[in-house]
Image (cartoon, rainbow, N blue to C red):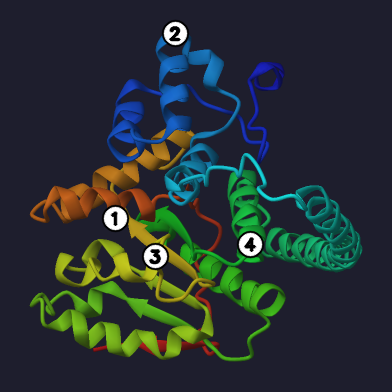
Amino acid sequence: MEVQDTEPKCSLCGAIVDDYCPEFVEQMKTNFGNFKDFQVFYNNFKKDPDSVRDQCITCQKSKWLNMKYTNNRQVRPPHTQFRGQTADGLIKKWLAQVVILSLVFGVIGSQISNYFNTSNTDNLKFTMRSLKSKFPSLQQSIINKLGGALLRLEKPGEPIVFMLLHDDTNKKTTDCLVSHASNLAKKYIFTNPQKSLWMNGSEWTSYSDFDHEDLLYKKLTTPLENNVLVLENLQDLPWSLAKMLHHLCDTENPTFAKAMYMLELRVKDDLQQLSEREKILVAERAMNMIWQDAPDEFRVPLIARLTSYVDAVLWESDQPCHRESFISISP
């Protein structure tokens, strides 16, 4: 216990930060090598790997995914001078208007922001307490990541993708966890009375023709306005359909900007005592295997997007969960 206290902790989620392995860093270089922030990270990593351990792998990767817009924006050149004999008068008048508008909107914006932040924080705390009481042995890492994901859903922009790894022994625990988490998100974050969606990748295994992508897309797009989709048995979803997740989870132009996708991925690895880095590597290795025939230029970006939040579920109970609150998406 004393050793863990000396380990660096993530400045965003508070999780213990594991060492960044060279293989993971090189893969991130492939995906984010053109970002200035990553270039600084990469140079510091080569000099001293411990110097970059201020954020965990999950938070660091999420930050780079969110920088797609900001790192590519062009800054407008500022105006350097005003022409004309009345320049001083125009500047003074313009500055006065800016000050007045800033004060007015600043006060209003501050009041609105404080109201929503307080409300959202209280809702999130209640949500996390409910989840922990339902699953007493739930790892703190899942609580932290899920809490961070729910907070990000309060801000418009891009959907949240949360992946849970499991094996054959804890499938029912995983189903119950995603079911309960989805219901809490609907109640406290989305406040949408409509049912969430549940899709079983195993039911779509035989639909491997590329024409079937349109079939699945049509079945999903209208009810996806309900905000939450659970996709179990991701490992059984053929690439012809899995590539459709590009449209749903895209950070730049997603089908629904405010949505939550909870993915269940069955793996054969031992899920006990995995570090944060190892959880991501296990997920990436599994998806690279099941979609090995897919073109790298499409498979690699999709896997990077689907592993924004990854964690492993340990056994809690074999009691099945009810799914009355879900709409089944079947062929």
Give the Cα distance between marks 2 and 3: 35 Å
Tell which tag, 4 or 2, sits nearer the viewer.
2
Going by the numbered disc 3, the residue's amino acid type is Cys
> Would you say 104 lies left or right of 259 here?
right
Choose the circle earlier in sequence order: 2 or 3: 2
Residue receiving disc 4: 150
Element at label 4: helix
Front in this rendered view, residue 198 or 225: 225
Give the Cα distance between marks 1 and 2: 30 Å
Residue receiving disc 3: 249
Element at label 2: helix
Going by the numbered disc 2, the residue's amino acid type is Lys
Query: On residue 47, which mark appears?
Result: 2
Choose the circle earlier in sequence order: 1 or 2: 2
Mark 1 Cα shell of 10 Å, populated few (<14), some (14-19), many (≥20) = many
Query: On residue 302, which mark appears?
Result: 1
